[in-house]
Image (cartoon, rainbow, N blue to C red):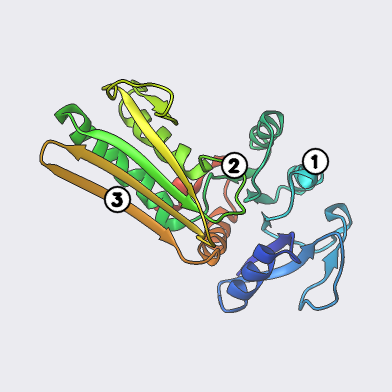
Amino acid sequence: MVRIIMSGCNGFMGRVVTDIVAADEDAEIVAGVDLEDKKDKTYPVFTRIADCDVEADVVIDFSSPKALDGLIDYCTEKKVAAIFCTTGYTKEQMEQIRAAAEKTAVMKSANMSLGINMLLKLVQEAAKLLAPAGFDMEIVERHHNLKVDAPSGTALALADSINEALEQQYEYKFDRSQDRKRREKYEIGISAVRGGNIVGEHEVIFAGLDEVIEFKHTAYSKSVFAKGAVQAAKYMAGKPAGFYDMGDVIRG
């Protein structure tokens, strides 16, 4: 049984993770951390993780970048694995996370979805075969109208995954409206669509002569990210110090 501390337990994702774990016989949330204890949980809730006196194997964090210092101090001191699912970290905070991996097991991934992380591997294999054959590569991402950043971190992760497979030969093109010229050979186009309540769609297009191959992932709810986080928690429990990502969970 994997014992989990849920950081950000009162938020939307914290509640979804709580529901998923409740139906999982191999995991249990033993404590939560949030700014307010709403008294509606089946586990104790602490307003500061430093006050948590419940033993656990792993912390899942869906809270805020502001909570990072306390989480790192707790996990490195207690040697508890940490899964950082929060977005919006600064460059300096990412350096903190990587430094913490020298003392305990740490996971940070651009997207916690198992499907997206499988896609990251698939597009690498496709790129190795198709790019040398002259195929152009484009990424289109679609999200709800409240999302403020563009392109999405997942779209960039897909582009980075392709570029890694192709020895970093490609540059990213985010806007074609300013340049009236034909497409460059060594570029990956990345486009963003914002509208409605689209949870998240990512499409990778390989366009060649007389044929097009498309890889597409659609998230119909945010529960896919929570499910991935729970799978990651079960994988990370008991792991030695080091920096991990969802690719490690996919590989098993």
Residue visible at 20% across and 33% down in the picture: 135
Please tell me the numbered disc located at residue 215.
3
Mark nearest the camera among 2 and 1 is 2
Query: Do residues under tags 1 and 3 come within 8 Å of each other at their CB atoms?
Result: no
Residue type, label 2: Asp
- Residue at mark 2 to residue at mark 1: CA–CA distance: 24 Å
Residue that mark 2 sits on: 149
| The N terminus lies in quadrant | bottom right
Residue 207 appears left or right of 52: left
Location of residue 213 with respect to 92 vertically, above or below? below
Q: Position of residue 225 (x, y in %)?
A: 54, 59
Q: Nearer the viewer, residue 141 or 239?
A: 141
Location of residue 180 with respect to 113 vertically, above or below? above
Q: Quadrant of residue 21?
A: bottom right
Q: Is residue 123 visible?
A: yes
Query: Do residues under tags 2 and 1 come within 8 Å of each other at their CB atoms?
Result: no
The residue tagged with tag 1: helix, strand or loop? helix
Q: Is residue 251 visible?
A: no
Residue projecting furthest to the left:
210
The residue tagged with tag 2: helix, strand or loop? loop
Location of residue 226 with respect to 156 vertically, above or below? below
Residue that mark 1 sits on: 69
- Residue at mark 1 to residue at mark 3: CA–CA distance: 38 Å
Mark nearest the camera among 3 and 2 is 2
Location of residue 71 with respect to 176 vertically, above or below? below
Residue type, label 3: Phe
Residue type, label 1: Asp
Q: Earlier in the sequence, mark 2 or mark 1?
A: 1
- Residue at mark 3 to residue at mark 2: CA–CA distance: 23 Å
Residue 19 appears left or right of 113: right
